[in-house]
Amino acid sequence: MSKEIKEFNVFSYLPPDCPDRLKKIINDCLCSNETLDNLLKLLGDVLNESHLVNIILDLVPIICSDSAIQLSELEFAILSLQNIYNMNLLKTDMKCKLLEVIATVLLTYQPSQEVVVDVVQFLLNVLKNKTESFSTCLTSMDCLIEVEMSTHGILKAQIENFFDFLNHEHLRDKASEITSLIIRNATNPIPNQSRVLCDLLELLPSLGPFTMVTVTKNILGLCRVGFQTELKNSLDKLIERYKTTFDLCVLQTIISIQECLGGITDETAVFLYCTHPAMPVGRNLVSLDWLASSLHLKKDGFEIRQFEPSDFDGADARLKKLLLLNKALYNQSLDPAPFYQHFENLIAFAVKNGNSRAFAAVFRVMRDMLESKFPANAAQIVLHSTVALGARHPACLPHIIDFLKHFGSNQPEQLPDAIILGLVDAFDEVETSTVMPHMEHLIQFFMEASLYRYEFCQPRMILRIIRNCLEEKKNSNCGIAVLELCQALIRNQDYEIFQPELKTVLSLVETCHSESDVKQRAWMLRSLITHVNTDSLKDAFDADMDLSSTGKVEKTDYPLIFVKILFDYNKTGDTRSESLPVYWSLERKRSFRSFYFPLEISLIKNSKNYYREFVGLKIDFVVDPKWGRAEPIYIPVLEVDQVRKACLQVHPFVCSAVTIEARVVMSTTDGRIFLSSLKPVHLKLEDFLNPLSSSKSFVELWDRLVSQSDKCYSSVLFLPQHENILKAVENGELERFQMTKKKPMELAMVTPDSFLVLVRILLVKNSWNAEILVEDPSVLPVIHSLLTEFST
Amino acid sequence: MSLRCLFVVSITESKLLFYRIFPTVEKRWKNEHPNFANLCLPNDQELLDPLLNELGILNPNIFQITRDSCQKKLQAPLFWIPFSFNPQIFWPVIVVECHQNRLLCGVPYLDQNLQPSGNQQSMSCDVVIVLELLSKLVHLIQLPPSKMADQLNRTIQQWLPFGRASGYQQLELRSLPPASQKTMWLRSRPKIELQIKEEVRMIASNLSVKADAYGTIYLTVDPDAECNNNIKLELGFSKLPGIPSALFHPSALAQWEKAVCHINIQQLQEKTFPLCHYSFPLEMPPIQPVLKIRIGELGKVSIFIQLHLGATTRNTLNRLEVRLPMPTGNRIARILTATSLGLVSLIKDGTQLLWNLGAFASSSSNAKLKDDLTLNVDVVMEKLEASLVNTHALSPSQEHIYLCYNQRNSN
């Protein structure tokens, strides 16, 4: 059986024109050892038959690679092959091939040091033999390189043998390569190492491209100190000789030395090469990478415009160019406007192209922006781009999930929160039929969102979106995924708060799904969350928290809890000041935005209240229905000295300041229920105006709005006490709407119903006026009252 | 730097056409990575599927974390392919795209473990060497499979026996007998042949037209020619508005004198090689396209494209291709009728209309292009998911038409 396999293997390597006698010899052999033996014997007998020699030399390494061959047999084979070579009856090309076979057989098994030394000596003898042709000398050196690569340091003592060949016209390249390799592998410096390194550096410009880059790689590390002049001389010669080359090996050599000497300059062809349309894209990418990863990119070395992506570029080239553009603009402290423009083009390209690689390019650029912290408002750009992309193109949600997981450690803390919140908010606003086809991605994203704090995750909103989708498409096959999402929400959030919504979704899964397994799982989950609850909580939820009619509620004349509104997320955490911008465009869909105000909720210590813990808190916010609505807040448990974070969510229908009355209903563990009025919450008009991303140009927006005459309404307002409004900006009250720090003051904001407002405050004939441009006339009184309030 | 393995893939057949491991290099890799000594490079389907997936040829629209994660640094043309049995470890491969939908791939020996990280500078040298090595083999990849395998085996044995350049080719060229001292003027076949392959690409929309031309000049020296030591050439670009942006083979020294380039080839390194890559912008593209679209009822859309060759332009085209991308969020469900020369087809899931005029654009049928070429096509359009409809808020609202054509001259 074994024999059959061996024979089969050898035969499969025989060429079609294999002579019959060779076939017969192989066929007659019982094992690989015997085959090898007989082939070597035959080789010795047919040295003048080149065709047969060629086939045998092809077969020998194949047979030797068989693990059944004994070590002693391999050593014998190497010795036999050396003897055959020394018979000197082979033609030059076969001699070269024989040398390669010896090296291959030697290096593909674990040879003893003794055998390796023998073969090295044999190869050196070939090299020293004056009657040998250049070809065999070259092959011998190539074999020696392979031996040195496998057995580091074995040629160290022989290095002087190669010095004579360094100036040899035909063998210079291989001699340089082997010398540099021996120096690199040596654990201690070789004798006269400095002189040899100088010689190699001098030879560098005259070497072939492959040798040039290999030698540079081998010795550059050793030449960093004390060889500046020699490096400079070599570099000058290389640049002079190869100033317009397209050979990557030569260019790599040049930029490696340049990096060593202080930086890449525009004298090399790299700058021309990296964006040259006639070069294959892969080569452009390699050279763009050199520049992007260069530690010393000299700023006068190139023109920024060269690295702007073109319409002809694909995703990879756009990505590399944008990374380089970002770095170059940052290094030269230039205006990032071209970067914005090309980044937007990249997003448009990805959306149009639709493939995952193009989206990956977008997120890689964003990651780079956050890492380099350039442009200064990188976080804002990332936020608005991610939310806009995710909301309009849910297919890229897996990219967003990956992006959220791999932001990097030095990013603004609130950015992932804001992305999650922005996207959940956006999905809540779009029509169900729009998100329906992307249920799978949506659920994946919501699973990720469930890991975030309640106020950003918004589980009730998530469950509403899921409920709508399930109601819309009753036979959806995403039942298991929905169940997993519900489990994630239960696991990661205070599920008691959104228990009713959770139950509704689980009931829908139970009724809509045909698979009994899914039905059962939904029923079990619903039962579980119902029965693990306390009776009081259960009662509270079943009564929909309207406990005023039960007669059991005890009204207090003092507030039991303290609700503190945090107007800016930034005040709680990171000291970086970043407002959350709004994406605005003329073409967007108009819809009312929700507003979120982070809250801190704690118990008020009061002598009349001796309870240390309350359960089932429901805070109701009462607003005029014409103004809008505010979502209630549920808190399962609140203990003394505990500060719970929550989020006030309001949906204004009009843009105005508002005072929101608040009351809380809360239970004790012994069954008492209290109703307490809270301090009203005052929200200012400016709290309902969103700042615009500062990546936008005010002038551009102004001109664009003016050009859309059907969408533009203007007004001028006299500001009697202009210093008040300037002071308000100084105090930071309006600063978030300020587009630039320059004069005249330019403010931009977006109303809850997505109308853009632009204000320019300037001095006209000794009086301060505000020029106002709005998209809808209904907004004018709002802005008038805002400006009047701040200037009187 | 050495190659551990070299292989050729046919994308259309999803098949390995050639596979060769360099045994000494592979043995060395295993010796230096004892923890992974049992880890063999994959072969056959085990190799193909992860490779094509990583290149985005398989599953192009599905997010794959090992391929598309934002934390992964794009190192193309170097790709890291996860092992199918353990996606946490990878093998590196450098990929060169060749004609006939074939990929020439080389697995480099990189001084690092099995992760796509490490010393970028050192890796860059290795990538560059492999890329240049592979580029010397590209011309063999377009041969029929058996001939290609035969030629590749022969070239590898002579030129890359240990997965590195042996220098044999240079030696062969340098060892040619020196040029005869006696100048002989004999009528004979040309000793040097120049071949120019040029491509013009153009994007036209109602707002702008962008076009540029780029090309490569190939030089072939007759094997028997005794001119390996010094070849002087003059290339004139007098009809261009300026000097083109050109890059030259390392054996060529180029000197510009106005629009004439004097080239001196001193050390011949190959017998056939690309002498020069050049490019220049075209202010006035040789072909002017006209695009008209009429939207009918029930998603029916009529598209009219007309191509007009400039009066002074001589037709030297051998390939002409027009691509019309559909507006974002739309695709062509089917073509109802098409009246034109050439072939009209849908590509990229119907999001692009391709009008291929290859056969009709060739210079032999010059008359065809003297008249305007027109395409009348009626298609049925359909919207993609509703969520895509609003994407124009993110993208420039202009429809493009892409034109691409080749011309090849030889003398």
Image: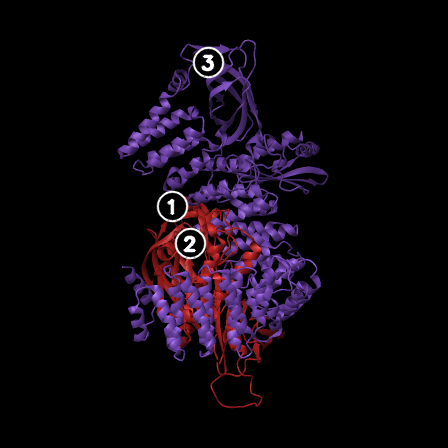
Chain colours: A purple, B red
Query: A326 or B376, which is in the foreground?
Result: A326
Q: Earlier in the sequence, mark 1 or mark 2?
A: 2
Q: Give the percent coordinates (x, y) of residue A679.
A: 55, 18
Residues at marks 1 and 2, CA–CA distance in whole angstroms: 23 Å
Q: Which amino acid type is shown beneath numbered disc 1? A: Glu
Q: Residues within 10 Å of mark 2 (few under 14, many from 20)?
A: some
Q: Residue at x 46, y 17 (%)?
A: A615
Q: Which mark is residue A668?
A: 3
Residues at marks 1 and 3, CA–CA distance in whole angstroms: 51 Å
Residues at marks 3 and 2, CA–CA distance in whole angstroms: 60 Å
Q: Which amino acid type is shown beneath numbered disc 2? A: Gly
Q: Residue furthest toward the right?
A: A766
Quadrant (top left, top right, bottom left, bottom right) of the C terminus of chain A: top right
Mark 1, chain letter? B
Instruction: Single out the mark in the foreground, 1 or 2.
Output: 2
Mark 2, chain letter? B
Q: Residues within 10 Å of mark 1 (few under 14, many from 20)?
A: some
Q: Give the percent coordinates (x, y) of residue A411.
A: 57, 40
Q: Please give the residue where the numbered disc 2 appears in the rendered image.
A: B56
Q: In this view, does A583 lie above or below B81?
A: above
